[in-house]
């Protein structure tokens, strides 16, 4: 490795001699140069932007030139897959050599910033790194290399962050995709991926998006939100928290519904905390992002087809295989298609306590969408048979909403009580009732409806304590 580092430094010095940096004037050491040497040196150097360029633009120019040369070196030596610690040492050596050769004065903090920026450009998310460390940012939406928006505190705002050009943005997108074994190019212009911190990523390239590449990052925070955290943040009440814990421990099947960005995945991870540590769990997701406390977990992930149309692994394939893996519970990140039928069958055949999520605007819409997805399995089943299957499999539908003030709350917890005629029957056990507004924030409270769930007696037979006071309706 020492020999390799030495060769790397040597080639860096040679490479740096061919190009000058564009930096602010007050950061360049003014020294007397021999006229002939200066002329010869300038002949060897590429034409660069004027040193009168504003500071930020000059910094981006410096970093851009350095990054391109660094990538050339790493690619030449096949070092792009080196582990981050070794790569940091190579970048540190590269920067030190560059600054010495080009006679640039940077203090220690500026030098370290340059190293961090180059490392992030090489193995991370480039200029988006500053947004990724802000815990208040929940979504990063890149509409183009110079149009980047974020969602913070429930509102979308434009930022001053930008990529150098479209090529720079495409390179970051391809790096994110390749890190999780996915590919994205003109022949396959869309990809779902994830970042090392679990953030969900979707990216597109032309011709899928005609105005250029886009990137959407759904962040889940630097720390996982637990049930107590969500209670404190007002996502649900302590009584609802206690009831949900009992439901999970008593192995009741849950369907979590909600719109895009409502907090379904966060809520799913929090609810699963109540699962006993000795149970064997199998998770199935399009992009693995669930973080569970339990040790006995097998994580499975879908995969799209390759360029030849082969190698696709669907959620339904994984679900069918999971049934042969002796799971105690199956957790499906989200049902989107025919796997809904297999999920219902698993819940009805000994895999009690399973949980899944679904996109829907209400609990009743969730059941209707589930029925549609079962039909996507390709079986010509009568509507009543599907509904009988769903009411037999599901015990509760928990609906999560992102309200107008940007706060994510559990809108209702509804018990599935059976069929009346040909209609599935639900009864709300808890719900959130709005009382008005205080400025921009919605004022309301979580209330019990006064209905005692039908499963309470069954849960008590399992020796779980379910106080009736949880369901007592309090007068407003």
Image (tube, grey):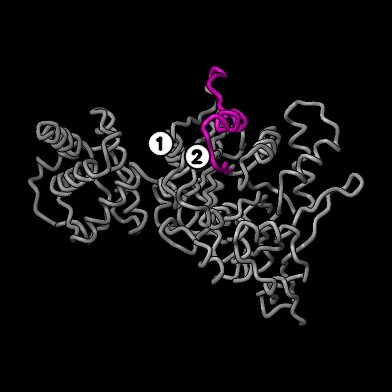
Picture layout, residue 31 above or below residue 476: above
Does residue 37 appear anywhere in the picture?
Answer: yes
Does residue 407 appear anywhere in the picture?
Answer: no
**45 on left or right of 221:** left
Which residue is rendered at x = 80% and y = 56% of the image? 426
Rendered image quadrant of residue 271: bottom right
Q: Position of residue 199 (x, y in %)?
A: 48, 49
The residue pinned by badge 1 equals: 179
SS label for mark 1: helix
Rendered image quadrant of residue 338: top right
SS label for mark 2: strand
Picture layout, residue 134 above or below residue 47: below
Crowding near the residue tagged with mark 1, few <14, some 14–19, many ≥20 C-alpha atoms within 10 Å: some
* Residue at far right of view: 421
Q: Position of residue 122 (x, y in %)?
A: 33, 41
Which residue is rendered at x = 76% and y = 82% of the image? 476
Q: How many marks?
A: 2
How far is disc 1 from disc 2 in space, using C-alphas?
Answer: 9 Å
Q: What range is drawn magenta here?
A: 308-331
Rendered image quadrant of residue 473: bottom right
Q: Of the residues under marks 1 and 2, which one precedes in the sequence?
A: 1
Residue 324 covered by magenta stretch: yes
Q: Quadrant of the N terminus?
A: top left
Q: Are marks 1 and 2 in contact (CB under 8 Å)?
A: yes
The residue pinned by badge 2 equals: 193
**454 on left or right of 49:** right
Given residues 193 and 278, the one toward you in this image is: 278
Given residues 114 and 228, the one toward you in this image is: 228
**438 on left or right of 27:** right
């Amino acid at each position: 490795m020492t020999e390799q580092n030495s060769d790397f430094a040597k080639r860096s010095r040679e490479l740096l001699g061919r190009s000058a940096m564009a930096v602010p004037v007050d950061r360049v050491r003014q020294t007397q140069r021999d006229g002939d040497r200066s002329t010869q040196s300038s002949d060897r150097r590429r034409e660069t932007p004027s040193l009168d360029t504003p500071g930020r633009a000059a910094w981006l120019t410096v970093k851009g030139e350095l990054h391109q040369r660094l990538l050339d070196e790493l690619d030449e030596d096949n070092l792009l897959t080196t582990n981050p610690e070794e790569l940091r040492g190579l970048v540190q050596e590269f920067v030190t050599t560059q600054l010495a050769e080009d006679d640039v004065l940077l203090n220690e903090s500026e030098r370290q910033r340059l190293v961090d920026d180059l490392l992030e450009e090489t193995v991370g998310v480039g200029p988006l790194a500053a947004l990724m460390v802000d815990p208040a940012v929940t979504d990063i939406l890149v509409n183009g290399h110079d149009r980047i928006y974020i969602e913070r505190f429930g509102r979308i705002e434009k930022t001053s962050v930008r990529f150098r050009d479209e090529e720079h943005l495409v390179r970051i997108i391809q790096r994110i995709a390749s890190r999780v074994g996915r590919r994205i190019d003109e022949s396959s212009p869309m990809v779902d991926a994830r970042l090392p911190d679990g953030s969900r990523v979707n990216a597109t390239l032309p011709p899928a998006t005609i105005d250029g590449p886009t990137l959407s990052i759904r962040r889940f925070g630097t720390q996982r939100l637990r049930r107590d955290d969500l209670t404190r943040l007002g996502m649900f009440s302590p009584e609802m928290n206690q009831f949900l814990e009992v439901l999970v421990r008593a192995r009741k099947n849950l369907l979590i519904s909600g719109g895009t960005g409502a907090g379904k995945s966060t809520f799913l991870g929090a609810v699963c905390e109540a699962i006993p540590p000795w149970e064997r769990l199998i998770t199935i997701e399009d992009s693995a992002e669930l973080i569970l406390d339990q040790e006995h977990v097998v994580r499975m992930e879908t995969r799209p087809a390759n360029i030849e149309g082969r190698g696709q692994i669907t959620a339904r394939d994984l679900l069918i295989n999971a049934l042969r893996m002796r799971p105690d519970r199956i957790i499906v990140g989200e049902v989107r298609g025919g796997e809904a039928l297999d999920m219902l069958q698993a819940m009805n055949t000994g895999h009690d306590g399973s949980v899944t999520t679904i996109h829907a605007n209400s609990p009743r819409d969730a059941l209707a969408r589930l029925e549609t997805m079962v039909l996507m399995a390709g079986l010509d089943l009568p509507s009543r048979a599907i509904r009988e299957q769903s009411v037999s499999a599901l015990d509760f539908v928990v609906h999560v909403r992102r309200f107008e003030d940007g706060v994510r709350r559990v809108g209702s917890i509804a018990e599935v009580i059976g069929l009346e005629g040909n209609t599935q029957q639900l009864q709300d056990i808890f719900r959130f009732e709005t009382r008005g507004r205080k400025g921009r924030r919605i004022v309301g409270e979580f209330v019990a409806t006064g209905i005692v769930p039908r499963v309470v007696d069954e849960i008590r037979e399992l020796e779980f304590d379910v106080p009736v006071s949880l369901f007592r309706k309090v007068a407003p």
